[in-house]
Structure formats: C-alpha cells, structure tokens
Image: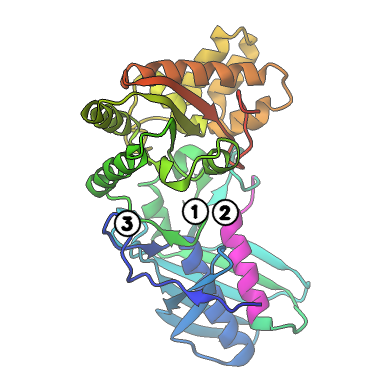
Amino acid sequence: MTRRRPFDLAILAPNGLRRGFSTGSAATAAVKAALLLLLRNERASQVEVSLPDPDHYLLIPIHALRRLGPDCAEAEVIKQAGDDPDVTDGARIVAMVLINQCGDIRFRAGPGVGTVTAPGIRVPVGEPAINPVPRQMMRMAVDEVLAGAMNPGFDLVIGCVDGAEIARKTFNPRLGIVGGISILGTSGIVEPMSMAAWMASIEVYIRVALGDRPTAIAFTPGKIGKAYARDHLRLPAKQVVQIANFVGAALDYTQQTLEEMDFRLDTLWVLGHPGKIAKVLDGVWDTHSGKSGMAMQTVAAVAADCGFAREQVQAIEAANTVENVIEMLRPDPAAPRLWRSIEQRSAELMQARVPAVRQVAVRLFAMNGQAIGAAA
C-alpha cells in the first residue's frame, strides 16, 4: 500500500488564502497523542493525522499532554482555521482517553462539546455532537497506534475549553445541540471562505467555466451535487463552480460574463441541498446561516401549496432542520412532488437574474448525496 503524503497547509488555497484544519482533525490529533502517551509512554510534540482522503495526512502540533492515571491520558490541540473566519479558530480542543476494557471505542462529550437533543443532523439524539467523519478519523488513529495489537476498548472524551461560550456564536442552539460546539469536518481541512476573497475567486471560476463557450455549467453551494455533475451530467471539473453561500453574486457574475462574451448559455445547473437553495424563495441570495434563517417555514409553505395535509405542514414547520424534513417525508410518495416544486420555483427566480441563460435547472439532494427531486 502506498504511504500517505503530508498535506502542506503552507500551500495557499486557489483564492490566495491560508487553509487550516477542522475541529475533527484537532480532536483526532489530541486522541492520537493521548494514546501514544498512554500505551507507549511517548510524549509527542506533533502527530500525523490520516485524512479521509486516502493519500494524505496532516502534521498537527500538540499544545499540552498529561497522564491522568494508569489507564487515562489527556492531550490538547489548538484549532487553526487559517484565513477562514471560523469562530472555533484558536479553540483549545481536548481529548481524554480512558481504557474501558469493553473492547470497543465509545465517544463521550467532555466540557464544551455539545450533545444532540433533537433529530435532523447526522448524529443520533443523545450522542455527543461529533460528526461521522471525525469519528472515523479517530477510530483510524486508534488503529494506527495499536498497530495490530488487541484493542482493549477506549472511551474518547472530547471537549473544548470555553466551548459553551463559543457555541453561542454558532447555529448549535437552534439545532438542538446543547452544552458546546460540534466536532466537524468532512475532509479534515478548512478551506478559507473569507467573503471578499471567495466572491472574487468565484467570479474567476465562473469566467473560466464559461471560457470555452460550453453548453452547460453547474453551480454547487458545497460538495453536495458534485458527483451528480460529474457522473450524470458529464461536466468537466472546470465547468462545476462551488459558489458557497453566494447564490445571487454568482448569478450576477454569470450574467455579466455572458454579456461581455455576447454569448447565451444553454443550461445553468444549480445542484445542492434544499436547506440552502430553498432560501431563494424568500428572496435570500446570500444563504449563510448568520445572515438568514433556516428554511423549514419556506418548505412548509410550498408543501401547503402542493396540497399536503395540515398536520404534515405543521410537522415540517416544527422540524429541527430541512434534512430532518427530508428524512420525515422519505416514505411519503408525495415527497418528490414537493422537492420538484421547490426546484422549479427556485429555478424561475434564478432565471430572472440571468436572462442570458436559456434554462436554469435546479436539482436537490439530501446530505448523503441522494437525489430527492427531479433527479431521483
């Protein structure tokens, strides 16, 4: 098997800003350092953290390291977000590792890490707010330290100094995550999303996407929808533009570029999660959670228009997240009609901002990438 290569955070992102590492990577580094102290009596000043990408690892410095007893050790890592305006930048992520003799890994919330109290995210109610990818990374770190030895079982207690205070600046209270921050990350890397820099880079990416006068390009707010653009639409990578939260600005850049080129684009695909895209129906064109509310009321209003029962509409309004709505409606044969209606209405509003595009086509996906509307 090919050995992983270091991911160099000193190499700037395409928008010219510094990358960082996620709270999930920080927690994994702390777990690994605590395990090395506990099992090998090694005091690591830095550790290699294997990323979900099978080719790379991060080298993460350890801020503090303590042995708390014969079966327990603790390590601390300072989260680094690079140039991203992340409220957890500089946060002290703590991992206490205890041998539990049950042969399994159990995740627990330490001080400053939240607990999930309501459905709608990818972690069950009652569990610590540690997302699936960070959990996978921590399990991998345990396997790497054990190096084939028998696993006695460990409790991984993940905390954050002042995490409850930091969490007040996040969406966690509205998501039903109480007591602190969430341990997040899908790639282990924080891509810098400074507003001015992102908007400038998005304009460049759009100009590149349109440069060869293609018949179609695609916008994705995040990673959701990229696989559809690649595998189903057969679009090359340069014709798929990640627009983050800047839906309105991206449409305006597209119209401006097409006018300058004196060119009409056949199809603009917009691919993403309804939690972001449905906000357009309320006239929200910057979908950042700090600048807009959540979209359950909007989805409920469309459901009412589509003839859903009053009780269903009320349940949608009361849902914790739009992802929760997707799961709730999954068995309902009328659900695709609701999502198709949101797709069509969103596309019509977007079309008005890009008259140089013949057709805007919106396709919606759940968090796991599964199509829920017209693409299903």
Residue type for callout 1: Ser
The outermost residue toward the bottom is: 41
Give the number of the mark in front: 1 or 3.
Answer: 3
Q: Is residue 128 magenta?
A: yes
Q: Name the residue that disc number 2 marks.
A: 131
| Helix, strand or loop for the magenta stretch, by majority | helix
What residue do we see at 52% from left, 55% from top? 186
Q: Report the span colored magenta.
A: 125-144
**Contact flag, marks 1 and 3 (Cβ < 8 Å):** no
Where is 81 relative to 343, above or below?
below
Image disc number at residue 212? none
Residue type for callout 3: Pro
Mark 1 burial class by Cα count in 10 Å: few <14, some 14-19, many 20+: many
What residue do we see at 32% from left, 18% from top? 355
**Residue 106 or residue 164, whichever sits in front:** 106
Of mark 1 and mark 3, the one earlier in the sequence is 3
What residue do we see at 49% from left, 33% from top? 271
Where is 77 relative to 110, above or below?
below
Q: Name the residue that disc number 3 marks.
A: 14
Q: Position of residue 133 (x, y in %)?
A: 58, 57
Give the number of the mark in front: 2 or 3.
Answer: 3
Task: Mark yes or no: residue 30 visible.
Answer: no
Q: Position of residue 86 (x, y in %)?
A: 34, 54
